[in-house]
Amino acid sequence: MELKLLGSKSVSASGLAHNGRPCSSFRHAVGVRFSPQLSSCRGTSSSVSNNTYLSKRAIASGDQESVVEEDYVYRITGTNGASSNLFSRNIRLLDFFDDQYEGVVVDPERLPANPNVFASMIRLSLNHWRRMQKKGVWLKLPVANAELVPVAIKEGFQYHHAEQGYVMLTYWIPDGPSMLPGNATHHVGVGGFVINDNDEVLVVQEKYCDPSSAGLWKLPTGFILESEEIYKGAIREVKEETGIDSEFVEVVAFRHAHEVVFKKSDLFFVCILKPVSSQIKVDDLEIQAAKWMPLTEFVEQPLIQGDCMFKKIIDICIARLGNRYCGLHPHKVVSAFDCSRLNFRLMMSW
């Protein structure tokens, strides 16, 4: 006889059991293991009356936390059990971890490749998590599993954010507005105010800029990298754009602006740096030119004098050079509010 699994490829009964034991290839094909009582399927000559109904308990394979038991109900039809149809089947839960906020995080390393299987698993998992009174669900889908994205969206998941290698989706189970934190709202930029012993400032002209800024000699600037300290980002950007090595002195100013890049807010930190080299090597990809410019000449540029923000930043830098202002230094500290209990750097007044 043959056992058909909801339209999936049929296998002969001789492949289901051997010497009274279920065949492993069948177990792997459907993702479940049958209890030892399922020995009535062995052999092809079993005599079973037409339209006989059998019910056996199946347990989903996988970790115990992901096990859900359901009854298999199938009907054997035809002479000598020529065929059988499965009316219900067991689907394994998605592998997941509990988070500290009564939610779950789906394991991105153990996702099914088949979208249909994923759809069934995600429905069962959501029902299970709802019964467990879970709250938020975090579903990270790597690029290799891109076919699962529309399936998850159809089941009610929402986009949270995307990075180069994955898209993150979320699902809020309880009634009412979602309490999950939103995507990151800010970029963090840095600028290096590098001044040498001759009162010359390191300045650059960018290749690609707004026409209103054409001809402006400005400070080397850029965005910090993920997990990069602010002061290290300033040193790196100066090095990349001009080839100048420098040492961090202080953070002297920062500004907060909104809808800067991709409608995200922007925090920009100005760091005073001390040069430890003098030979300029321009980054040809981003920078048109770089040079050492006398501080007085730099300040008198019309675009600096005509912009309140730029002028204020430069005034603060000059006040610091005259010891009329105290900036911020980095201090390595540990905080009880840091859930990872790892050290991090906090800018504090000196």
Image: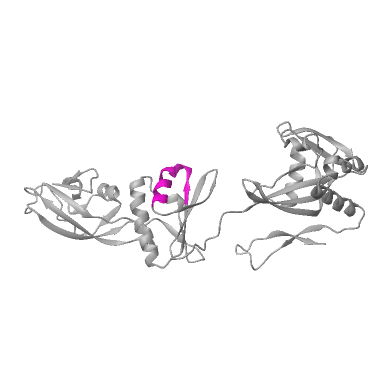
* Position of residue 224 measured from the top left corner of the image (x, y, whole percent): 69, 47
Left/right placement of residue 322 relative to residue 238 reads: right
* Spot occupied by residue 23 in the image (x, y as percentages of width and height): 23, 49
Left or right? Give the position of 184 relative to 66. Answer: right
Q: Nearer the viewer, residue 264 or 225?
A: 264
Q: How many numbered dots are placed on residues in this image?
A: 0
Spot occupied by residue 14 in the image (x, y as percentages of width and height)? 17, 46
Above-or-below relation of 199 to 211: below
Question: What is the span of residues highlighted in magenta in the rendered image?
Answer: 140-154
Depth check: give the residue in front, 142 or 156.
Answer: 156
Q: Residue at x 74, y 35 (%)?
A: 211
Identity of the residue drawn at 26% across and 47% down: 25
Magenta stretch, main secondary structure class? helix
Residue 118: image location, x then y, percent: 36, 50
Q: Is residue 3 visible?
A: yes
Q: Going by the image, does 187 lie left or right of 92?
A: right
Q: Give the position of the C terminus as an image quadrant.
A: bottom right
